[in-house]
Amino acid sequence: MSRKEEIYRSSYEELQRTMENQLEAYARVNQLAVDLAKIDLLVVSAILAGISISGLALSIPLVAGLLSFLYALWCCARIYEPRSFARGIGAGAVDEIDDAVQDGRDIEEHYRELMFSYKEAISYFTSAHSSVKSTFRNALWSSVTAIVFFSLVFVRNLRTYPYSVDVVFLFVVPVVLLWGKDKYGEN
């Protein structure tokens, strides 16, 4: 095996592993989104059941919490949206490769073309995965925001305070959680 052939072959194999790792990472985020959506649906169901049983009045924190959960569910649905990711050489290249081999293409050129076939797919997938990860982070932090708002509903039922405090919470809670989202963001 020539030195160039070995370089192209090893590069192609590494790019193939990179693509497999990317697909695995996407599947992991997709599964996390499904799990988060299930948890959010259970929590919303429990909250709505609690509201109907205890006769809680509509309040700003309650509405803000429900809206936060709805946004989280929407984000999870966006992640789960089916996507297709082109990768590798594709079915159309089979005949082309066969013709090239029949015409005398050497193994070095073959591995070189395989290597370049993964370049665009990996680049596209990197961008798509980054977007999906960002959407999942939005869903996660929106769920945390909802939980904080529902905690405030619980506090409101234990201790009465002016409704103007709810308005303050309506602005303070998202700002603090957005700060947290940015602080513990992309690694």
Image (cartoon, grey):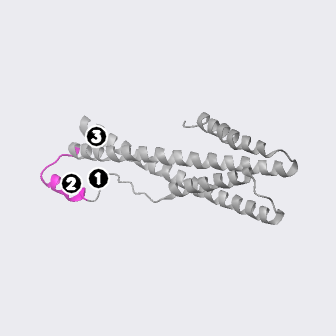
Determine which residue is flagged by label 3: 8
Q: Which residues are magenta?
A: 92-107
Q: Residue at x 79, y 46 (%)?
A: 163
Q: Residue at x 62, y 56 (%)?
A: 70
Q: Main secondary structure of the magenta part?
A: helix
Q: CA distance from mark 2 to mark 1?
A: 10 Å
Determine which residue is flagged by label 2: 97
- Earlier residue among tags 1 and 3: 3
Residue 118 locus on image (x, y percent): 33, 46
In the picture, the quarter occupied by the N terminus is: top left
Q: Is residue 143 above or below residue 47?
A: above
Which kind of residue does numbered mark 2 sit on? Ile
Question: Mark 3 Cα within 10 Å, few/some/many (few <14, many 20+)?
Answer: many
Which kind of residue does numbered mark 1 sit on? Ile
Residue 157 locus on image (x, y percent): 84, 52
Whether the residues at callouts 2 and 1 have beta carbons within 8 Å, the answer is: yes
Front-most of residues 127 and 27: 127
> In the structure shown, which secondary structural element does the residue marked by tag 2 occupy?
helix
Residue 53 locus on image (x, y percent): 81, 66
**Quadrant in the picture for residue 57:** bottom right
Q: Is residue 175 above or below residue 124?
A: above
- Earlier residue among tags 3 and 2: 3
- Earlier residue among tags 2 and 1: 1
Determine which residue is flagged by label 1: 89
Front-most of residues 65 and 6: 65
